[in-house]
Image: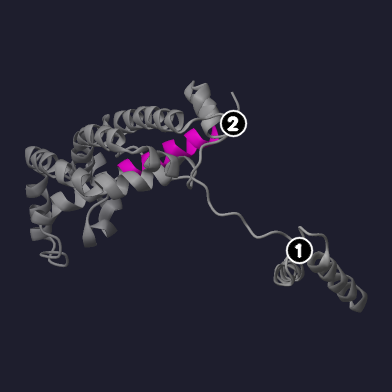
Amino acid sequence: MRTKTVWLGATAAALAAGTASAQSAQDAGALLGRILSSGTAAPSAPTTAPPPGVTNSEASSGLKLALGKAAERVVAQLGRPGGFADDPRVRIGLPGPLGKLNGLFSTLDRAGVGGGLSAKLNAAAEGAVGKALPLLKTAITRMTVTDALGIVTGGDTSATDYFRRTMGPDLQQAMTPVVSKSLSGVKAFQALDRFSAQNSLIAGQFGARDLTGYVTEKASDGVFLYLGEQEREIRRNPLGTGSKLLGRIFGKGG
């Protein structure tokens, strides 16, 4: 260990005293500190530049095209009959204390005597998801080149996080009247009120007036969950989108 220290000291001295282009003693000391602490150079700062061979404009336009197609797939998948109900990850269960009775409700629904409340909640979400597509398309259109480059060089769900931040509240606002109308049309409010009235343990703990907000929030969460999955897949296999430009943007060749 003493031999290593002596050698490192000599190295620092040589660096400090070298030729006309040699570093100052202070620089040499700093270099020695880095050698002793890690043995490697300091990590480089994050970059927002596109990969070599890709212009800023290409990176921005390619990303927007991919995100637009991803948004279409998400809305098509979640907006179809069973889009929420058939997927355990986004299926909307009963709200509040009623959530403990999801299994019972499912059994009653299958027997034709449960009023189908859980199914009605998911159907309302499926009907409202269509409102997400124009909002997502608008958010993509408004995305600046700087925004796009930050997403390209960001984490696995940088685009999804961008959407949630820039249009999440607008999405819930747009979905709310659709969810409310759907729930009313299938008499979900009445079904919840009747069940609550017949079960004193949960009566008043979650009223019908809270149901719209609950379903809307769950529907919004489902949209962002699916968007995140689409984004990860684009980054993992950009050539799978059929775009060689995306392959270059995400460093996968092509």
Q: Which residues are magenta?
A: 223-237
Can residue 92 be seen at all in this image of the molecule? no
- Relative to residue 241, is residue 132 depicted above or below? below
Q: Main secondary structure of the magenta part?
A: helix
Residue drawn 12% across the image and 59% down it: 196
Q: Quadrant of residue 171?
A: top left
Q: Secondary structure at mark 2?
A: loop
Residue 45 position, x and y percent, is: 55, 54
Closer to us: 200 or 126: 126
Residue 106, how many percent across, how many down?
Answer: 27, 46
- Nearest to N terminus: mark 1 or mark 2: 1
Q: Which residue is found at the position 30% from the left and 28% from the top? A: 76
Q: Is residue 146 left or right of residue 128?
A: right
The residue wearing badge 1 is 39
- Towards the viewer: 20 or 107: 20
Residue 242 highlighted magenta (yes or no) = no
Whole-percent x, y for residue 180 in the image: 10, 44
